[in-house]
Amino acid sequence: MEMDNRNTFETTVPGPVNSGVPGNSPERGPKWVVARTVLGILSIILFVMVAFQSCAAGLGNALSDNGEVGGSAGFMCAINLLVAGLIVLVARKTVKKAPMIVAAVLMYLNLLYSQVMAGSYKDLVIWGFLSFAFGVVYLFSVLHTKKQFIIAGVITVVYLFLMIAAGSGSGSSKPQSENKGAAAEETAVEESADAENQDDPADAEKEDKTEEPDAQEETVEKAAAEETEAEKTEESDETGDSDAAAENNKETTNENSVQGAAWETGEGKVLVSEDSIGSVWAQIAVPVENTGSVNLYLESGTMDLEDADGHLVESLSMVSVYPQVLKPGETGWYFEESTLDEKPSSDLKVVPHVDVEEATVDCIRYETSDVTISDEEYGGIKVTGRVENTTDEDGSMVEVVVFLYDENGDFIGNIYTYLDGDLAAGDKIGFSASSFADVADLTAADVADYKVYAYPTQFQF
């Protein structure tokens, strides 16, 4: 009898049991690798875009001194995108959870930065939600059981709702710089109301001493009161006409008696023209005069351009002002040059929104000399001159601005430039500035008068 000595062995390779979830599916496993690889590459590309955009936003925040940190938050988001992208690309084929969880946490943090610290940097909100979507893919790609999917899903949904709520709360509050004037005005109104509601000590003392006045004293006091009221009414009638005329001559008047600051916002000017290549340019200028007894600091503001029917044509934000610090009696100008989509059919009106407060920084002015106004070879006006630092401190980011006026004293243009490098104490250096957009087709002969300001860029916190 023959015996079959051949034995048959069935080889079994141990491995995880397929529980039916996508992260553990053999047929879908390679798709997670491809998805992570693509997102890792996109994350690195986004790093470059977000980093450059955040630098520009941070510079805008610093120049406008609006107290926002959107630029810094955006740069942190960019770093997280870079680090997460590198981790994903290096460990794209791994089955370990740690690398992908770290990448997901970095992406989830980007959503936190965008919702809490974006401010006026609105694009950061987009980058935050996009990063969050990347993080969801990174996290769920390394989960293997239904229990892990449920836990991660609950955490993700709760975190998303918390971040949306945080973003809504921070968006509803105005930046501190926008609320300074309102807070000061509210304080002044409250103090005025308190003063009106307080009893006059002299009247109280008088009432205590004369609780039962005789008829004769009452008659005398009543007659005196009626005479005083009549005099006030007569004075009001005499001054009413002059006060009304003064109000008509002022477009806007802002006064703060608590801080001793007062200013007037004059009528804005809009000059529109079309250049040789068909671009429509607009120069917008709004004067602000310091009518008080203390120095003023002018923050960057906003302007709305309206047509003859009151419809909004253009809205301009972060409008610069020259100079930022005004002495009593001086006039500064909110000034902006911008292109329009098309040439308006009627004259435009500017509606300014200025931000003025009492200055806490010194008003620094540098002396100018040898100022010459000439015509450019291919059109426009050129201003040259010299600036001397007569102070004891070096000046940085020194700005030179020239206001141009016609023979009637009307504002017709603004030319400005920055000096290269710092201006050392006691040093004198030349400058040259040209008009950026020659909207009014001005020539040197049109300029009857001018005013030059030279000063270092100052920030007030």
Image: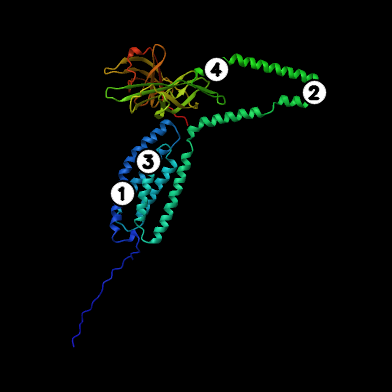
Q: Amino acid at mark 2?
A: Pro
Judged from this view, the residue extending furthest toward the front is 309
Q: Which mark is residue 75?
A: 3
Q: Which mark is residue 213?
A: 2
Q: Amino acid at mark 4?
A: Ala
- Specify whether 350 is left or right of 379: right
Task: Give the residue drawn at x 34%, y 40%.
Answer: 51
Dot 3 or dot 4, earlier in sequence: 3
Task: Give the residue drawn at x 28%, y 70%.
Answer: 12
Task: Give the residue drawn at x 49%, y 24%.
Answer: 296
Q: Residues within 10 Å of mark 1 (few under 14, many from 20)?
A: many
Q: Which mark is residue 244?
A: 4
Residue with the mark numbered 1: 40
| Mark 1–mark 3 distance (CA, rounded to whole Å) | 18 Å
Can you tell which quarter of the image residue 438 is in? top left
Dot 3 or dot 2, earlier in sequence: 3
